[in-house]
Image: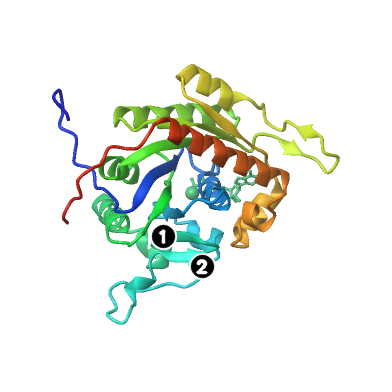
Amino acid sequence: MHSHGQQQPQKIAIPGVKHVVAVASGKGGVGKSTVAANLALSLLMQGRRVGLLDADIYGPSVPIMMGVNQVWDPNDPNTDMSVFPIEKYGLKLMSMGFWVKPETAMIWRGPMVAKYLTIFLTQIPWGELDYLVIDLPPGTGDAQLTLTQTAPLSGAVIVTTPQDVSLIDARKGLEMFRKVNVPVLGIVENMSYFVGADGKRYEIFRHGGGKKLAQEAGVPFLGEIPIDPQVAESGDAGDPIVHRVPDHTVSKSYLALAGVVSEQIGKMGTPTELPGLQL
Ligand SMILES: Nc1ncnc2c1ncn2[C@@H]1O[C@H](COP(=O)(O)OP(=O)(O)OP(=O)(O)O)[C@@H](O)[C@H]1O
Ligand SMILES: [Mg+2]
């Protein structure tokens, strides 16, 4: 019901999907994709049915991070479209990287991004999912707008790093979701500190900015993820750390994050049933 002001575009219900969670940031390279993949796997390891949608149409990360090397041509009548979403480690995955080589996507404009995201959200048979985690591209551009306007998002997780510049951008990300009435589930500080072989914590950057920003903005602080070369190595190897080394210190942080995220979503109750949209 929108009795006042601007009419909200009708949001598309994704049949069978209980909660859509976006992982976002204002700034690039802060670790959104890594957080999204490890969060999705952590939720799965906690017994949930989970999907991971890579909404980064120009620079998809999911194929490499999840070790899916095959590319399908959606326009070839011989392509078996029922392979989508791809299943890996028990997760359901969709990425533009499964369809065309990323170089090709670079020439597309905004409307193409919107078109493909809508297809991914509505024409891919996700099946019954507790969570569909969405890995957003950096910034506040077309993909973010399309997504926040079309998908019934339960909420957004904002990723930041401890540096001041990153925090400023995280603030912009927060503002964007507020404007489109998507609840911010909270802030996670990535690359927060380093744990040495001696078990000691080393605060490489000034740590704690994420918590401060969350307090200022009045949103929950969801947790801290340490910086560790094994995170990057696992991502490059196509087997995220929480799956590859579940008892690693960093993996424990991701599992804790997943616990807090599902708790936050639980607090918000069941999302309102939205009518499906015919495309
Ligand atoms: N906690 C961590 N410790 C060590 N390396 C990390 C950590 N988190 C992410 N990285 C590494 O940092 C790089 C950037 O991470 P990622 O691709 O997840 O960022 P992103 O925010 O999704 O980037 P983009 O804005 O380009 O989409 C990757 O090489 C990744 O492996
Ligand atoms: Mg990314």
Question: What amino acid type is highlighted by mark number 1?
Answer: Ser
Q: Position of residue 159 (x, y in %)?
A: 51, 36
Can residue 140 be seen by looking at this rendering?
no
Q: Do the residues labelled 2 and 1 touch (CB within 8 Å)?
A: yes
Quarter assignment of residue 239: bottom right
Count of labels in the image: 2
Q: Position of residue 17 (x, y in %)?
A: 35, 50
In front: 67, or 123? 123
Can residue 219 be seen by looking at this rendering?
yes
In front: 143, or 48? 48
Quarter assignment of residue 197: top right
Residue that lies at the very extreme toward the right in this rendered image = 198
Quarter holding the C terminus is bottom left
Residue at image x 67%, y 31%?
205
Quarter holding the N terminus is top left
Question: What amino acid type is highlighted by mark number 2?
Answer: Val
Say above or below: 65 vs 252. below
Residue that lies at the very extreme toward the bottom in this rendered image = 78
Residue at image x 33%, y 53%?
16
Q: In this view, does 152 lie to the left or right of 229?
A: left
In front: 279, or 47? 47
Residue at image x 36%, y 59%?
127
Q: Where is residue 88 in the image (x, y as percent from the top left)?
A: 52, 64
Q: Which of marks 2 and 1 is nearer the N terminus?
A: 2
Which mark is drawn over residue 95? 1
